[in-house]
Image (cartoon, rainbow, N blue to C red):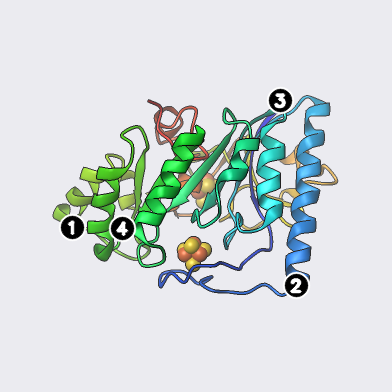
Amino acid sequence: MDLTVLYRGPLVSCDYDCPYCPFAKRRDAPEQLRADRAALERFTAWATAAGEVGDTLSVLFTPWGEGLVRSWYRRALVELSRLPHVRRVAIQTNLSCRTDWLADADPATVALWVTYHPGQVRYERFLAKCRELSALGVRYSVGVVGEPGHLAAARRLRADLPADVYLWINAADGRTYDDTEAADWTALDPHFGYSRHPHPSGGQPCRTGESVISVDGDGTVRRCHFVRPPLGNLYDGSYRGELRARVCPLPVCDCHIGYVHLETLPLYDLFAGGILERIPHP
Ligand code: SF4
Ligand code: SF4
């Protein structure tokens, strides 16, 4: 089986304080951090063993908070990247962490989905981190939330990033864009159109629940992060018998980590080779 797994454990804490985020500056109590670490290590052990039954895996960590300031996420990326049956291991991150640990990861497999949060980090510091990733040969995309106040910073970033690094723009939650505003963002991200409006998904075929699953810290398997009824559990194998072609039960899908898997959109071709870390095919 060739499976794509989106993993989201109990971690909610973040070192940033973004005004548009419910997890800003949240703290995890020590026992919550221990539970998150134990859950991640259990998942990593499962992913390691998946090779023994002939499965290949692609993994995206999508923590609520910031994972890479925790040693266990860094270790999971390094360890999983070195396994021959892991085709890709990626994480969504604000890139506040150091980058030197990535030298131990396999650059052919590891990847970062980086979000730049103007106002939370000095521009020069963030750009320097991106350049460190490029120097290490790490695959990464960089994105910005399409708030009007971010436009100047996003333009500056596009101008300064290496040309081969994709800059994506996410439509801000609850914001609509007139054509002039959309044109501004599309000038930076030619694929902004996919984020601008939620995608009507009800009744449309979606690869989640067949070749893509979402897993939480307890091992509960769902088809995606947005459709709540469970398919089973990862650790007792009960999800496997539930994997089959499915249509979406929700009216719309408005998050890239979901709609990228909609079969009605051409995004598996557009992002071929970089679906999880959101890197378009060159
Ligand atoms: S970096 Fe991400 S998780 Fe942290 S506060 Fe900002 S949006 Fe939220
Ligand atoms: S279209 Fe989106 S919400 Fe619907 S099943 Fe797929 S990922 Fe989930």
Quadrant housing residue 2: top right
Q: Tell me whether circle 2 and circle 4 mark residues in contact (CB < 8 Å).
A: no
Q: Tell me whether circle 3 and circle 1 mark residues in contact (CB < 8 Å).
A: no
**Tag nearer the camera, 3 or 1:** 3
Q: CA distance from mark 3 to mark 4?
A: 37 Å
The foreground one among 222 and 132 is 132
Quadrant of image for the N terminus: top right
**Tag nearer the camera, 2 or 4:** 2
Quadrant housing residue 70: bottom right
**Tag nearer the camera, 3 or 4:** 3
Quadrant of image for the C terminus: top left
71 relative position to 192: left or right: right
The foreground one among 206 and 50 is 50
**Count of number-bearing discs:** 4
Which residue in the rendered view is the most extreme toward the left? 180
Query: Which sits earlier in the primary sequence, circle 3 or circle 2?
Result: 2
The residue tagged 2 is 30
Q: CA distance from mark 4 to mark 1?
A: 13 Å
The residue tagged 1 is 178
* Type of amino acid at the residue the image marks with label 2: Pro
The residue sitting at 26% across, 61% down in the picture is 176
Helix, strand or loop at label 2? It is: helix
Helix, strand or loop at label 3? It is: loop
The foreground one among 53 and 246 is 53
Helix, strand or loop at label 1? It is: loop
Q: CA distance from mark 3 to mark 2?
A: 34 Å
Q: Tell me whether circle 4 and circle 1 mark residues in contact (CB < 8 Å).
A: no
Q: Position of residue 281 (x, y in %)?
A: 41, 27
Query: Which sits earlier in the primary sequence, circle 1 or circle 2?
Result: 2
Q: Tell me whether circle 1 and circle 2 mark residues in contact (CB < 8 Å).
A: no
The residue tagged 4 is 146
The residue sitting at 51% across, 57% down in the picture is 96
